[in-house]
Image: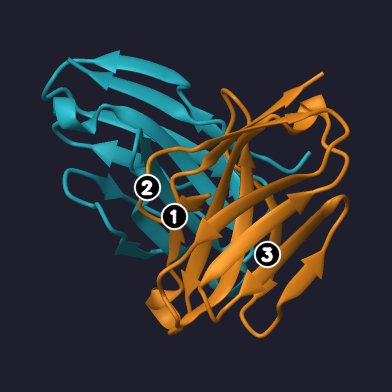
Chain colours: A orange, B cyan
Amino acid sequence: GESVGLHLPTLSVQEGDNSIINCAYSNSASDYFIWYKQESGKGPQFIIDIRSNMDKRQGQRVTVLLNKTVKHLSLQIAATQPGDSAVYFCAERGGSGGSNYKLTFGKGTLLTVNP
Amino acid sequence: EAQVTQNPRYLITVTGKKLTVTCSQNMNHEYMSWYRQDPGLGLRQIYYSMNVEVTDKGDVPEGYKVSRKEKRNFPLILESPSPNQTSLYFCASSPDIWRNTEAFFGQGTRLTVV
């Protein structure tokens, strides 16, 4: 998995399998954690976020899990499709308010879905 | 269609020649920001704006300027571009700073400074 600090890791899965992309974060004071998807040649696209007082949130085919004890965030994609192939970024938001609502992005994980 | 539009998409320029990258959003968003994306470094915030005439520095503001005279537009200005500003630039907007996690990003501007 990635960390807000490492080289771009890759994950290759078969179409139809479930994908799990991991991320480690560093700021215990972050109030939101977010996943973005970036397809080749496009800008990042918001997928889902989770507030720091939650440990799980589900969207359409995606689930985000937050483990604050070990500062770990994961994105689960169910029944992965070729259209899911992209770079996935996690981000954390500083929770101090005002100008400190800063988003800090990880370096991303490249997901490749094999047909 | 809700969108953030950046222009140009690609730009090659020479060191020292002033340039402006435009960004426009049609969602009446208050919060806008500029990022640069470099291999191995991820997305880093350059400047942000909480509303018209309210701008502030992000993590890497050196060599850049911005303005926010209208709500929809947030241009990025490089007064004297240098090769270390060669990068992929993204503009983003969100309804307000409290909802800045739901950011809408533009398609990106790939800038090369020679």
Asked if the residues shown at circle 3 and circle 2 are in contact, with their CB atoms under 8 angstroms apart, the answer is no
For the N terminus of chain B, give its image quadrant.
Answer: top right
Question: Pointer 1: what residue?
Answer: A3
* Residue ID for mark 2: A6
Which is more N-terminal, label 2 or label 3? 2
The residue at the point 40 percent across, 35 percent down is B89
Question: Dot 2, crowdedness within 10 Å: few (<14), some or many (≥20)?
Answer: some
Q: Are the residues flagged by discs 1 and 2 from a single subunit?
A: yes
x then y, percent, for residue B107: 56, 31
Q: Residue A88, position in %: x, y?
A: 60, 43
User: Vertical placement of B93 versus B54: above or below?
Assistant: above
**Foreground: A71 or B52?**
A71
- Up the image or down, A6 lies above or below B39; here it is below
For the question of whether residue B49 can be seen, the reply is yes
Chain bearing mark 1: A
Q: Is residue B28 visible?
A: no
Identify the element where label 3 is drawn: strand
Which of the two labelled residues, at mark 3 and mark 1, occupies the earlier sequence position? 1
Answer with left or right where residue B1 lies relative to residue A101.
right
Chain letter for mark 2, please: A
Q: Front-most of A74 and A29?
A: A74
Q: Which mark is residue A49?
A: 3
Residue shown at 36% from the left, 17% from the top:
B11
User: Quadrant location of residue B77?
Assistant: top left
Expressed as whole percent of the image width and height from the top left, the position of residue A7 reads 38, 40
Separation of marks 1 and 2 at Cα, in angstroms: 5 Å
Residue type indicated by callout 3: Asp
Q: Are marks 1 and 2 in contact (CB under 8 Å)?
A: yes
